[in-house]
């Protein structure tokens, strides 16, 4: 392996990515087995949540390994902050997909919030507005953020695979227009 030049490897080819995902599943199987076994040995009555996964990029073999070793799958949804009800509904549907990939294990939303716009200069840019005026990753104001939060909780309550939710924070964000350097 030392003599082989990795410069000839295409890291974004479908074959390489599939091999990487399978390898990550093998690593996860070993890691999750050791971790879950240790928790169960020292605290037999504890629920094992394992690590927190990102909702948009965890490889299916890793989720499958998590489902074999954890009692519930802890997820930070993606996007972390929503701009509209469609994103909230899509996030809840994605949680059902994650549960299915993890062998039907329930899902716990470990960290989510909805940012909202404030006048420029008060906080760093967490959201942005495109040329058509659509905000991305935040609501127009605190009321809009509250409504999105309410609607997301309704989506989660309607999704049988979700067993809990932990709200991260109330967060305002400065808005930047596309193409600005502010």
Image: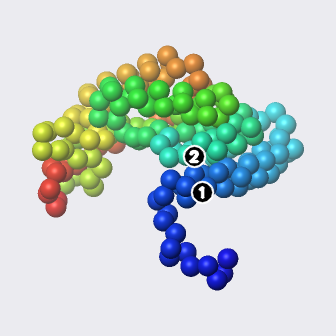
**At x 57% / y 19%, what residue is drawn?**
160
Secondary-structure class at tag 1: helix
* Residue lying furthest right: 41
Q: Nearer the viewer, residue 180 or 174?
A: 180
Secondary-structure class at tag 2: loop
Asked whether the beta carbons under mark 1 and mark 2 sit within 8 Å of each other, the answer is yes
**At x 29% / y 34%, what residue is drawn?**
83
In the displayed structure, 32 sits above or below 132; it is: below
Q: Residues within 10 Å of mark 2 (few under 14, many from 20)?
A: some
* Residue lying furthest bottom: 3
Percent x, y of residue 58: 55, 46
Colour scheme shown = rainbow
Can residue 143 be seen?
Answer: yes
Q: Residues within 10 Å of mark 1 (few under 14, many from 20)?
A: some
User: Can you identify the residue that label 1 sits on?
Assistant: 20
Drawn side of residue 142 relative to residue 71, left or right:
left
Q: Nearer the viewer, residue 5 or 33?
A: 5
Question: In front of the other: label 1 or label 2?
Answer: 1
Quote the CA–CA distance across marks 1 and 2: 9 Å
Drawn side of residue 41 relative to residue 156, left or right:
right
Q: Which is more N-terminal, label 2 or label 1?
A: 1
Percent x, y of residue 100: 61, 29
User: Can you identify the residue that label 2 sits on?
Assistant: 59
Percent x, y of residue 59: 57, 46
Q: Quadrant of the N terminus?
A: bottom right
**At x 59% / y 23%, what residue is drawn?**
161
């Amino acid at each position: 392996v030392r003599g082989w030049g990795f410069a000839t490897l295409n890291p974004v080819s479908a074959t390489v990515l599939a091999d990487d995902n399978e390898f990550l599943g093998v690593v996860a199987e070993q890691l999750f087995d050791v971790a879950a076994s240790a928790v169960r040995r020292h605290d037999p009555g504890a629920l094992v949540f394992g690590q927190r996964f990102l909702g948009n990029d965890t490889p299916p073999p890793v989720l499958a390994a998590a489902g074999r070793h954890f009692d519930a799958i802890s997820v930070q949804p993606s996007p972390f902050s929503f701009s509209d009800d469609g994103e909230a509904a899509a996030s809840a549907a994605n949680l059902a997909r994650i549960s299915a990939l993890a062998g039907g294990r329930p899902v716990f939303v470990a960290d989510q919030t909805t940012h909202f716009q404030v006048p420029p200069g008060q906080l760093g840019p967490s959201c942005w507005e495109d040329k058509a005026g659509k905000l991305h990753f935040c609501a127009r104001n605190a009321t809009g953020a509250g409504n999105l939060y309410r609607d997301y909780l309704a989506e989660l309550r309607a999704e049988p695979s979700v067993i809990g939710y932990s709200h991260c924070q109330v967060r305002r964000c400065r808005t930047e227009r596309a193409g600005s350097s502010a």
